[in-house]
Image (tube, rainbow, N blue to C red):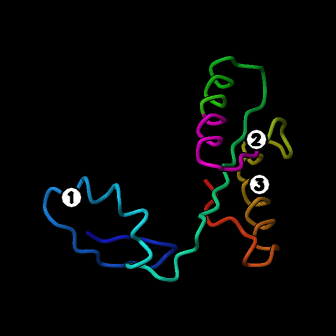
Amino acid sequence: MVLAVFGSYHKVNLPSGSLEVLGSLKTDIKHVVPDLPEVTRVKKVTAVFGQRNHIYEQALKTHEHHNAVHGYEMDVLRERVVGSYWSKPAYILAQVIEELAKPKCQRNHWIM
């Protein structure tokens, strides 16, 4: 099995039938990847604008629950910031730039 962690790859040898092992892998990962941070910070970024749509709102509620369980941040763009289709890509780019402006130790590790 190959484990991808923050852009680097580490080979991990797991025994066959290793589903049980995968459950403990999260706690034992420090042995495999000693430089792995204690907490992986994740931020979700999305855009929902235009006419209110209860289906989209319900989908966001499921993300809110997921975020609460896992301690993730979430930012939602609620109005167009530039014309045509470019609001969401522009917003995501702004979020990436905002993260890169932070000191490395304070940055989120993942933006989804």
**Residue furthest toward the top?**
54
Res. 4 image quadrant: bottom left
Q: Amino acid at mark 3?
A: Ala
Q: Do the numbered discs 3 and 1 sit on residues whose CB atoms are within 8 Å?
A: no
Q: Earlier in the sequence, mark 3 or mark 1?
A: 1
Q: What residue is rendered at 25% in x and 69% in y? A: 1
Marks 3 and 2: which is nearer the front? 2
Q: Which mark is residue 18?
A: 1
Relative height, residue 107 to residue 84 (above, below) = below
At which x and y percent is residue 5? 46, 72
Q: Earlier in the sequence, mark 1 or mark 2?
A: 1
Q: Earlier in the sequence, mark 3 or mark 2?
A: 2
Task: Identify which residue, 111 or 52, lies in the foreground.
Answer: 111
Q: Amino acid at mark 1?
A: Ser
Which class describes the residues within 10 Å of circle 3: few (<14), some (14-19), or many (20+)?
some
Which region is colored magenta?
A: 63-76
Q: What residue is rendered at 70% in x and 19% in y? A: 53
Q: Which mark is residue 76?
A: 2
Distance in Å between CA atoms under marks 1 and 2? 38 Å
Q: Is residue 70 magenta?
A: yes
Q: Secondary structure at mark 1?
A: loop
Q: Which mark is residue 90?
A: 3
Q: Is residue 2 magenta?
A: no
Q: What residue is rendered at 61% in x and 28% in y? A: 59
